[in-house]
Image (cartoon, grey):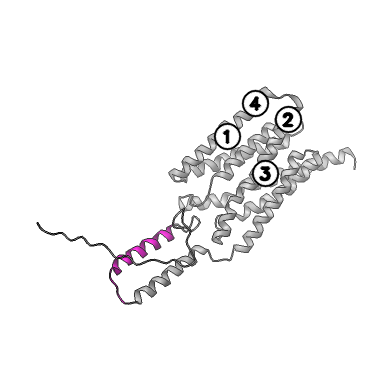
Amino acid sequence: MNADSFAHLTLAFGLLGNVVSFMVFLSPLPTFYKVYKKKSTEGFQSVPYVVGLFSAMLWIYYALLKANAMLLITINSVGCVIQTFYICFFLFYAPRKARIESLKLIVLMIVVGFGLIVVLTQFLANGANRVAIVGWICLVFALCVFVAPLGVLRQVIKTKSVEYMPILLSVALTVNAITWFFYGLLLRDFNIAIPNVLGFTFGVLQIILYFVFKNKKPISDEKVSELEVKKSIETAEPKISGKKDQEIIDVVKLSALMCSIPVAAKINENTNVDDHLVVEPHVPNHTIEVAA
């Protein structure tokens, strides 16, 4: 295969990569539509979108330093716009605590992190060394883009629910990784090719977990059912002292469990719920006032 054939094939994979990457950027739309309908971000996180914006900005900087990388500039410029829109949308509907954490992450990665990379590489490196350093940084954060959606895998395995793992994003990332791997290979740019090997692996893992757990009953619902059965059995037993107080405790705990279903199904962040929740009877203390 001659040089012209390689050039045309590289261009073809680059254009295909632009199309697939554009689909990747649009794949979270169902997630944000769900956020819009519920007027709440619930268990969703802003981390993948902040990391995605940071990575897109790095690739633009790398492409500007490297010759013949216009296709990287085009798609990552579009990516910056779309990721910025997602982040603004998330901040609008996020609760106060999540909004503050997201803003801290944005300042840390976009303002401080990217700013330091540009300043240090401009003043402490030159020529080919600058391109190589920025290329390695891009490689590392490209891996972060692929790893970021895996943050929900622990939640999926723990709750046996795929509600917060968008399958469209997983499929799009897998196809995107294959396309950009061949583009980087043909361009002989391993900063592009290497991270997409792991990107393909992570994408396949997410798809497998989705099909394993998509028909599973969420574990949080099972725990709620167990509590309801246990409560009905307890109401059939003879009345004991302090029964009304105990029923109030049961209702409060059941309400707390139901409110925590969307976020990892736990009652307390520091206490795990066992398969059988045992509630010890509580006898209220009585205070007797004695007249002087």
State the image coordinates of residue 40 (x, y, percent, origin top left).
Answer: 46, 50
Residue that numbered label 2 is attached to: 131
Residue that numbered label 4 is attached to: 120
State the image coordinates of residue 144 (x, y, percent, origin top left).
Answer: 64, 43
Residue at image location 60% in from the left, 29% down from the top = 115
| Quarter in which the N terminus is drawn | top right
User: In the rendered image, is residue 165 in sight?
Assistant: no
Placement of 187 over or under 222, stated as above or below: above
Outermost residue, front side: 292
**Mark nearer the N terminus (2 vs 1):** 1
The residues tagged by marks 2 and 4 sit, at their Cα atoms, a distance apart of 13 Å
Residue that numbered label 1 is attached to: 110
Q: Amino acid at mark 4?
A: Leu
The residues tagged by marks 1 and 4 sit, at their Cα atoms, a distance apart of 15 Å
**Mark nearer the N terminus (1 vs 4):** 1
**Mark nearer the N terminus (2 vs 4):** 4
User: What is the secondary structure assignment of the residue under circle 4?
Assistant: helix
Q: Amino acid at mark 3?
A: Leu
**Mark nearer the N terminus (1 vs 3):** 1
Residue at image location 28% in from the left, 70% down from the top = 241
**Mark nearer the N terminus (3 vs 4):** 4
Give the magenta part as a residue range.
238-259
- Local crowd size for mark 1, using a 10 Å CA cut-off: few (<14), some (14–19), many (≥20): some
Residue that numbered label 3 is attached to: 143
State the image coordinates of residue 274 (x, y, percent, origin top left).
Answer: 48, 64
State the image coordinates of residue 88 (x, y, percent, origin top left).
Answer: 51, 40
